[in-house]
């Protein structure tokens, strides 16, 4: 998946000189995860800017650049550090178009998520802070194909897009991606597995875990449909509601913490749009309401996994 | 030191300052009639800062005002009706009623970025504007303001540091009006002149009497020219005084009466009127003509604004995203080819000339210590007895003469410094060098 993201940035910078990259250690070093390796050599210091450790300055400068028609791609070394520029993102960038009609065509991307023993400050899934901020688009792909196509769409979008890259998937997910040019539209979920008994809804690394669970459930005779959200904002309500109307049962899985996680919002959307179609309670399997702990047994406890999903699905299937 | 201003320009400076004051005066009346929807933040006594600095910009240059820089918006060409309607939350306002006060801008023609209420955030944003302008070959300068209060924020430091590291063509006006809401400068920061902060970023700074519009303009013009010649960024501290409370609700009883009197005697508009007479630039006739013009414009725009409709409620739901309503197109003033591979390709390796060691610095130190002088050391600002002249800290001295030597000196990281006392920097250099 990492290579797909890298390709997307290279191709977009090749296509359009208005695309520039800015972040910490993205140039000579090629980024903490080497996503931007080779970028500086190809595009030079004017287009690949190694910035001081100052997230507010980086995002602010990128916003200023976008006002002159550039399309900056900002790297957060770890997405956890987006907290350092929260104000710049939520108050300056997100509200710009609504307040005074100034679009901010910026991509803010960075490695997120747990499962790699990064501890409380290198494992977070901070998407929901921003889900609650009108004006931002939030993309969180689970496959290499989607990562490349969605990042290209994000760079071409006229709005600020937060692009979450699950670091557990960086080098674990490998797939052939087409040679030619393609994009994946923002705002469209995808059905990864068709099923009739219940719907499992997830995204990012948990999309893979949910698919595994669905296969396991199939062996027990439970035919689960699995939907990968891909984009969190704007949320693809139509795909979600269509699936629930078909299977009548919904299980939402996310790695993010439970309280205030996206499962709650989706549950509300389903209650508003498909309450009559529900045959059972909306269930969720999520991260714990704690920081992401460091030690492997603790982190294992924190994260959702196949067993937890299968157990929850079995229970839901009883209805 | 006098700026080369024509008679016409001299009169324009008066026009904008007086327009600024009369406009705000009318808004106070509207506020008392409950016609202003939200808060009203007076820039009374600070008109020379907004007008003098913005007047130094060319139309292609970018600015971003703070709440008390209405004068700058007028100079940039926004009509008074924009400011009336913004405050009255009307549908005809630049933001259609979605935001108020000076929170509006114009990307296309007036090159103005809207501020937000969180202080300091404009500095990194305008640094980005300056960087993008350079990237596109536009030869523009970006200018913004920050208050004495806002200079304590993290965004101020992050932004100014990035601007300095990038050598961005950014002019930052540090508008020291002595009060951060109710807290005096002396309780916010431990330095006398906020401009001294520039030393830490290796950039040039000036301290200017903010109630003298010609001096403000002269300093700003010099800074803008320097930035356009790729010698930015530059910080200008202007000493002025907020003559009203933080906003209309605040009677500002915490301001010592003597302090108000001190600054009242230095009112920027009456001072400038006196200057115009003494220098025979205008007469009573010219003044009354300008005043009448201001009255007519304000009458017309106030009427327009009062008669304007409020926005339709459904507007609240629109415009969160740009759904193709804007076409984003950069204005390229240099060949794109220069930024396209292989022309832009480089060897991805760092050059670290002195390896971060001390030898170069020690040699450099011996060379320059004799030329250093004291910085912005004269008393000013908090309770200063006399109006300050333009003080250019010695920082700039070396910059013009030997830029490369300066560069090295400014950028060598000291860490905790050498243990050998003989290697320590002489005391005066701490202030004087950039």
Image: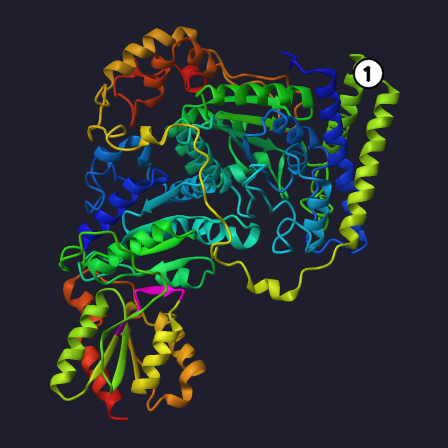
Res A305 → quadrant? bottom left
Q: Is residue B361 left or right of residue A88?
A: left
Residue named by callout 1: B277
Whether the magenta-drawn stretch holds residue A309 is answered as no
Quadrant containing the N terminus of chain B is top right
Would you call the spot at circle 1 few (<14 residues within 10 Å), some (14-19), or many (20 or more)? few
Q: Position of residue B127 (x, y in %)?
A: 45, 34
Q: Is residue A257 left or right of residue B379?
A: left
Q: Is residue A76 left or right of residue B135?
A: left
What segment is highlighted magenta in the picture? A227-234
Q: Is residue B49 above or below residue A16?
A: above
Q: Position of residue B264 (x, y in %)?
A: 76, 30
Looking at this view, is A105 or A297 the one in front?
A105
Q: Farthest bottom residue?
A: A319
Whether the magenta-drawn stretch holds residue A232 is answered as yes
Is residue B257 something that shows in the picture?
A: no
Q: Position of residue A236 (x, y in %)?
A: 37, 70
């Amino acid at each position: 998946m990492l290579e797909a993201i890298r390709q997307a940035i290279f191709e977009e910078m090749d296509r359009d000189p208005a695309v520039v990259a800015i972040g910490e250690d993205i140039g000579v070093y090629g980024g903490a995860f080497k996503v931007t390796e080779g970028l500086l050599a190809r595009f030079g210091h004017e287009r690949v800017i190694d910035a001081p450790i100052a997230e507010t300055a980086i995002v602010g400068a990128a916003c200023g650049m976008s006002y002159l028609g550039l399309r900056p791609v900002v790297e957060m070394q770890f997405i956890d550090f987006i907290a350092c520029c929260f104000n710049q993102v939520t108050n300056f960038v997100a509200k710009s178009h609504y307040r005074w009609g100034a679009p901010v065509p910026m991509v803010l991307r960075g490695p997120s998520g747990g499962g790699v023993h990064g501890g409380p400050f290198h494992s977070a899934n901070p998407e929901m802070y921003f889900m609650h901020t009108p004006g931002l688009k939030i993309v969180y792909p689970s496959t290499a194909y989607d990562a490349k196509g969605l990042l290209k769409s994000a760079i071409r979008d006229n709005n600020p897009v937060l692009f979450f890259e699950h670091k557990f998937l960086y080098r674990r997910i490998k797939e052939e991606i087409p040679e030619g040019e393609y994009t994946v539209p923002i705002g469209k979920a995808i059905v990864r597995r068709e099923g009739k008994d219940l719907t499992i809804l997830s995204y990012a690394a948990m999309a893979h875990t949910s698919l595994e669970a669905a296969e396991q459930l199939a062996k027990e005779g439970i035919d689960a449909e699995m939907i990968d959200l891909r984009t969190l904002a704007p949320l693809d309500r139509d795909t979600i509601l269509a699936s629930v109307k078909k299977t009548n049962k919904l299980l939402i899985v996310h790695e993010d913490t439970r309280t205030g996680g996206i499962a709650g919002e989706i549950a509300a959307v389903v209650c508003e749009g498909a309450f009559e179609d529900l045959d059972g309670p909306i269930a969720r399997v999520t991260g714990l309401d704690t920081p992401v702990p460091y030690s492997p047994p603790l982190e294992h406890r924190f994260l959702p996994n196949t067993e937890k999903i299968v157990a929850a699905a079995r229970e839901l299937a009883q209805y | 030191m006098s700026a080369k201003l024509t008679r016409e320009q001299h009169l324009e400076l008066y026009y904008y300052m007086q327009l600024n004051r009369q406009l705000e005066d009318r808004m106070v009346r509207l506020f008392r009639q409950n016609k202003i929807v939200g808060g009203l933040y007076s820039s009374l006594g600070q008109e020379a800062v907004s007008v003098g600095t913005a007047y130094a910009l060319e139309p292609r240059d970018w600015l971003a005002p703070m709440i008390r820089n209405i004068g700058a918006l007028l100079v940039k060409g926004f009509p008074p009706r924009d400011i009336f309607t913004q405050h009255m939350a009307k549908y005809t306002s630049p933001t259609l009623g979605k935001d108020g006060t000076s929170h509006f801008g114009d990307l296309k023609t007036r090159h103005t970025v809207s501020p937000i209420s969180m202080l300091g955030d404009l500095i990194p944003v305008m640094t980005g504007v300056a960087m993008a302008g350079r990237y596109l070959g536009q030869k523009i300068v970006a200018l913004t303001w920050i208050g004495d209060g806002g200079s304590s924020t993290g965004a101020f430091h992050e932004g100014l540091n990035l601007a300095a590291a990038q050598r961005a063509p950014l002019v930052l006006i540090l508008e020291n009006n002595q009060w951060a809401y109710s807290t005096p400068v002396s309780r916010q920061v431990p330095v006398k002149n906020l401009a001294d902060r520039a030393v830490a970023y290796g950039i040039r700074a000036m301290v200017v009497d903010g109630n003298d519009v010609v001096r403000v303009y002269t300093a700003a013009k010099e800074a803008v020219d320097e930035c356009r010649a790729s010698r930015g960024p530059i910080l200008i501290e202007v000493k002025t005084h907020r003559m009203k409370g933080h906003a209309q609700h605040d009677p500002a009883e915490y301001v010592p009466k003597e302090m108000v009197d001190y600054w009242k005697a230095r009112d920027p508009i009456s001072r400038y009127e006196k200057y115009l007479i003494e220098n025979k630039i205008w007469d009573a006739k010219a003044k009354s003509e300008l005043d009448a013009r201001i009255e007519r414009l304000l009458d017309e725009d106030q009427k327009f604004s009062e008669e304007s409709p409020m926005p339709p409620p459904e507007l609240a739901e629109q415009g969160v995203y740009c759904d193709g309503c804007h076409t984003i197109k950069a204005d390229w003033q240099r060949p794109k080819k220069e930024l396209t591979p292989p022309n832009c390709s480089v060897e991805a390796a760092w050059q670290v000339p002195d390896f971060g060691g001390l030898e170069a610095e020690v040699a450099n130190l011996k060379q320059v210590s004799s030329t250093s002088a004291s910085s912005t050391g004269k008393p000013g600002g908090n309770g200063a007895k006399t109006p300050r002249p333009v003080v250019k800290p010695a920082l700039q001295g070396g910059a013009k003469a030997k830029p490369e030597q300066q560069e090295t000196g400014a950028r060598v990281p000291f860490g905790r410094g050498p243990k050998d006392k003989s290697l320590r920097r002489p005391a005066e250099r701490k202030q004087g060098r950039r």
